[in-house]
Image (spheres, helix red, strand yellow):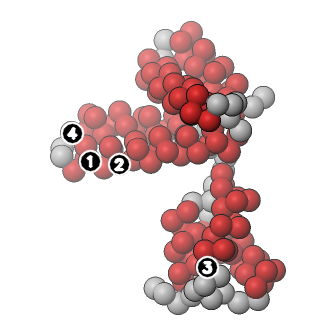
Amino acid sequence: MGLKEKIMNDYKQAMKDKNDIKKNILNYLISQLRYKRIELGRDLKEEEIISVIKKEIKSRKEAMDLYTSSWHEDMATQEKQALEVLEQYLPPMLDEQQTRELVKMYISKIWGSLTPKSRWKLIGLIMQEHRAEIDPQLLNKIIDEQLNLN
């Protein structure tokens, strides 16, 4: 079963269970996936679905931070619940150690050493193959460390 089918099935189950929080979040996610499908003019690939989910997660995290800083704890709690639902649909992310090993493997396999010029090519190659399972901020931090920029 694909990711889209899993989301649809979970949405139907949330309606049956009368789980309004999950139902509303998945309904919004489904509508975002439809918008993306219309924008592209074709069915979405798994990576594109994951990209939409990550975008929504980022948006929810920003909203949660905003609500927390403005003492709206009830709204921040709602955003946290939305995050928990959305994160269920992401593949497992590589941790920091796994990301470091991946960067080292790419550097040794392709260049032998990393230069500031080759940095963006390296990021592009890694993200092209591992977009769904890697945190771009962590990747950038590790590459900065490899270049001794931190």
- Tell me whether the residue at label 1 lies in contact with that at label 3, contact meaning CB atoms closer than 8 angstroms: no
SS class of the residue under badge 2?
helix
Amino acid bearing label 4? His
In the visual, does 94 lie left or right of 25? right
Tell me if mark 4 has few (under 14), some (14-19) or many (20+) residues whose alpha carbon lies within 10 angstroms of its own. Answer: few
SS class of the residue under badge 3?
helix
In the rendered structure, which disc, 3 or 2, sits on the residue that comes first in sequence? 2
SS class of the residue under badge 1?
helix
* Marks 3, 2: nearer the viewer: 3
Amino acid bearing label 2? Glu
Tell me if mark 1 has few (under 14), some (14-19) or many (20+) residues whose alpha carbon lies within 10 angstroms of its own. Answer: some
The residue under the point 60% across, 14% down is 12
Amino acid bearing label 1? Leu
Residue linked to disc 3: 119
C-alpha separation, residue under disc 3 versus residue under disc 4? 41 Å
- Tell me whether the residue at label 4 lies in contact with that at label 2, contact meaning CB atoms closer than 8 angstroms: no
Residue linked to disc 1: 66
The residue under the point 75% across, 31% down is 2
* Marks 3, 4: nearer the viewer: 3
* x and y percentages locating residue 25 in the rendered image: 47, 27
Q: Quadrant of residue 94?
A: bottom right
In the rendered structure, which disc, 4 or 2, sits on the residue that comes first in sequence? 2
The residue under the point 81% across, 80% down is 109
The residue under the point 54% across, 67% down is 138
* x and y percentages locating residue 88 in the rendered image: 59, 38
In the rendered structure, which disc, 3 or 4, sits on the residue that comes first in sequence? 4
In the rendered structure, which disc, 1 or 3, sits on the residue that comes first in sequence? 1
In the visual, does 109 lie left or right of 92? right
- Tell me whether the residue at label 1 lies in contact with that at label 4, contact meaning CB atoms closer than 8 angstroms: no
Tell me if mark 2 has few (under 14), some (14-19) or many (20+) residues whose alpha carbon lies within 10 angstroms of its own. Answer: some
C-alpha separation, residue under disc 1 versus residue under disc 4? 9 Å
Residue linked to disc 4: 72
